Image: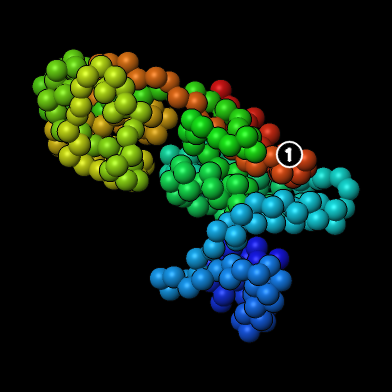
Amino acid sequence: MVLEALLAERHVSRAAIRLNRSQPAVSHALARLRHLLDDPLLVRHGGGLQPTARAMEIAPLLADALDRMRRLLVPAGFDPATERRTFRLAMSDYGATVILPRLLPALRTQAPGINLEISQSSREAMTVQVMDGEIDLAFGVFPTLERSMRALRLFDERYACLADDASLGGAVSMDLAAYLARPHALVALRADVESEVDSALAAIGHKRRVALLLPHWGAAAGLIAGTDLVLTVARRILPPSVEANGLTVFEPPFAIPVFGFEQIWHRRRDSDAAHQWLRETILSLCGD
């Protein structure tokens, strides 16, 4: 359990708080683990601890072993009304906007003892966190997954374009030439990650100019009014009142494939009754 906490926190003091133990006790336990496994396991780097290759190799096996042991110690049967547990979910603010308004009322009514910890990171980082046991469920678009991972599609999503009414001059749509002539807003964590929109444009031999890059789906729509920017985003993130705020929503002037929004987990969680209940609850609330 000490190694699990250290791998999750990458810091002795934070691991000690998580384990409700003293910092010297955790440091001594780490020293014993290093001797037992004949490896440094975690080395100092940038004010924290960086796992060694051996530690990263151990992490999924450790998570699986501890998960099995915890299930052995949990009383048989599962009752959401009496369950006391914290689930760690990873999602973007798009996922939070779509999922949490439906999920939270259900949890407070059906399972008031279940707590949620929400985090956000890149698609690649979320996948690694699920594999390492740091995250219980992750939500997003995952084109490829390891065989040890499970995925369940919650719904299909489509793209829409958004532009300022005045900048359109009374038009209610835009052809491809006009679309490419405009500057664009892009929602992404990093500039070097090609979005589904840019992949679709590249497939027909075109490229757009991104004048605004930001990581927040929820804030993006509100930044378009009064500008010449075009925003192309998933439809469900657009607020219901968007067209009443001087903005026009229209279909993209080129084909962008529909994408499936999924929840993913590690197969070690398959037989976890509480985890299964949460997955099925989310599917019933958010599935098409």
- Name above or below for residue 167 compared with residue 58: above
Residue pictured at 55% horizontal, 35% vertical? 145
Residue 114 coordinates in the image, percent (x, y): 68, 52
- Count the marks: how many? 1
Which residue has dot 1 on it? 270
Which of these two is toward me, 162 or 38?
Answer: 38
Residue 128 coordinates in the image, percent (x, y): 54, 48
- Side (left or right) of 73 relative to 185: right
Residue pictured at 51% horizontal, 71% vertical? 43
* Quadrant showing the N terminus: bottom right
> Colour scheme in the image?
rainbow
- Residue 84 in sight: no
Look at the numbered disc 1 and give the secondary structure of its residue.
loop
Q: Quadrant of residue 197?
A: top left
Q: Quadrant of residue 146?
A: top right
Residue pictured at 54% horizontal, 63% vertical? 52
- Name above or below for residue 103 compared with residue 73: above
* Quadrant showing the C terminus: top right
Residue 44 coordinates in the image, percent (x, y): 48, 73
Q: Quadrant of residue 221?
A: top left
Question: Which residue of the protein is positioned furthest toward the right in this rendering?
Answer: 76
Question: Which residue of the protein is positioned furthest toward the bottom in this rendering?
Answer: 24
Residue 96 coordinates in the image, percent (x, y): 48, 43
- Side (left or right) of 283 relative to 83: left
Which of these two is toward me, 11 or 215?
Answer: 11
- Name above or below for residue 218 compared with residue 19: above
Which of these two is toward me, 73 or 6?
Answer: 6
- Side (left or right) of 44 relative to 207: right
- Residue 37 in sight: yes
Identity, as a three-letter code, of the amino acid under mark 1: Asp
Residue pictured at 48% horizontal, 39% vertical? 95
Which of these two is toward me, 101 or 16?
Answer: 16
